[in-house]
Amino acid sequence: MENKIKITAGPYVFAARLETELAPQTCAAFLARLPFKSQIVHVRWSGEGVWIPLGDYEFGVGYENHTSYPSPGQFILYPGGISETEILLAYGGVHFASKMGQLAGNHFLTIVDGLENLTALGKMTLWKGAQDIVFELQS
């Protein structure tokens, strides 16, 4: 299974590693949907993060390698349930939550190159609005 992903978010490019050993089902479900194109917006309740709201989109996975406190550069997938399905990227301190309360998401992807631009992406999204994001296999 390929484990390197190229992420283009706003004007920035990042390289990330799939956490295939810790979240194999989530990684497989995400890989099956590549290239994955959407937009990120700034989180409302969780702190310093950006997210992709996905409504009732189904990834067909349950919880694995889940956390409420992703570190900067970690992506988590919330598979849905008491809140909508979403993907969140922490760029600073995050306590993952929604208006329903604390949530936990599957840590499945970690940025390994480009971290120096992560805070700038977060602040750009906060002050300038939604940014395009594309996930694709790194060539």
Image: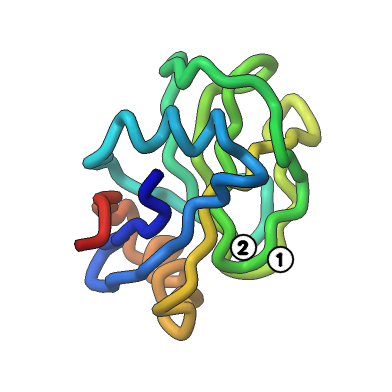
Q: Residue 86 or 63: which is nearer the viewer?
A: 63
**Residue located at (40% from left, 79% from top):** 114
Quarter the C terminus occupies: bottom left
**Residue located at (31% from left, 60% from top):** 7
The residue singled out by tag 2 in the image is 48
Q: Is residue 100 above or below residue 12?
A: above
Quarter the N terminus occupies: top left
On residue 67, the disc is none
Cα distance in 3D space between marks 2 and 1:
5 Å
The residue singled out by tag 1 in the image is 93
The answer to whether 10 appears left or right of 119 in the picture is: left
Q: Which kind of residue does numbered mark 1 sit on?
A: Gly
Q: Position of residue 46 (x, y in %)?
A: 68, 49
Q: Is residue 58 visible?
A: yes
Q: Which kind of residue does numbered mark 2 sit on?
A: Glu
Question: Would you identify the image quadrant in which residue 55 lies?
Answer: top left
Mark 2 and mark 1 residues within 8 Å of each other at the beta carbon: yes
Residue lying farthest to the bottom in this orientation: 116
Q: Residue 66 or 94: which is nearer the viewer?
A: 66
Secondary structure beneath dot 1 equals strand
**Coloring scheme of the render?**
rainbow
**Residue located at (35% from left, 70% from top):** 14
Q: Is residue 43 visible?
A: no
Q: Residues within 10 Å of mark 2 (few under 14, many from 20)?
A: many
Question: Would you identify the image quadrant in which residue 16 lies?
Answer: bottom left
Secondary structure beneath dot 2 equals strand
Q: Residues within 10 Å of mark 1 (few under 14, many from 20)?
A: some
The answer to whether 124 appears left or right of 74 in the picture is: left
Circle count: 2
Q: Residue 53 or 139: which is nearer the viewer?
A: 139
Q: Position of residue 80 (x, y in %)?
A: 59, 20
Q: Position of residue 82 (x, y in %)?
A: 69, 16
